[in-house]
Image (cartoon, rainbow, N blue to C red):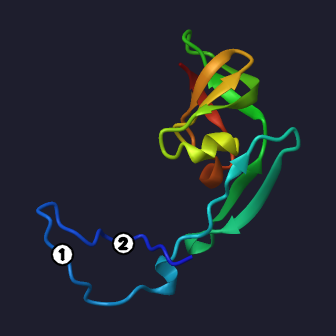
Amino acid sequence: MATSQRRAKRKSTGGRYWDDRTKRKKELSRFAANTKISTETRTKSVRACGGTVKRVLLAGDQVNVMGKDGKAQKTTIVNVVENAANPHLVRRNILTKGAVVETKLGKAKITSRPGQEGCMNAVLV
């Protein structure tokens, strides 16, 4: 994957930034986890910068939902309702931050990044 976590190619005025150097291997991002809804929870360990080990969530159906009363409750995800980042992820039931999911408690919006943090947290909508 050749995406890089560097500054944009264009300035806010529309002018172009010219690169003073090329991309480095350490700046490459990794493939998306594409966390799916599944009854079997699957995680993967990934080495991050500085030797830190991240737990990447590949599949799961349990989510910690923060209710209106301020209490968290663990519940099951039924399916993905909408995703502002990419509407094609809804059809594939892929979970990302900001995705609205249907749970047994009602609709909830994912506030964590499952592919980065290895857990799913949400708030009722």
- In the rendered structure, find residue 6 and report the number of the disc placed on it: 2
> Which three-letter amino acid code belongs to the residue tagged 1?
Arg
Q: Which residue is pictured at 54% across the width and 35% down the height? A: 111
Q: Nearer the viewer, mark 1 or mark 2?
A: 1
Q: Looking at the picture, how far across and down is residue 57, in whole percent?
A: 72, 51
Residue 21 appearing in the image: yes
Provide the secondary structure element on which disc 2 rests: loop
Asked if residue 24 is positioned above or below residue 36 in the image, the reply reads below
Disc 1 and disc 2: Cα gap in Å?
Answer: 14 Å
**Residue receiving disc 1:** 16
Q: Which residue is pictured at 84% across the width and 45% down the height? A: 41
Tell me the quarter of the picture where residue 6 sits: bottom left
Q: Nearer the viewer, residue 95 or 74?
A: 95
Q: Is residue 43 left or right of residue 32?
A: right
Tell me the quarter of the picture where residue 95 sits: top right
> Which three-letter amino acid code belongs to the residue tagged 2?
Arg
Q: Looking at the picture, how far across and down is residue 83, in whole percent?
A: 54, 38
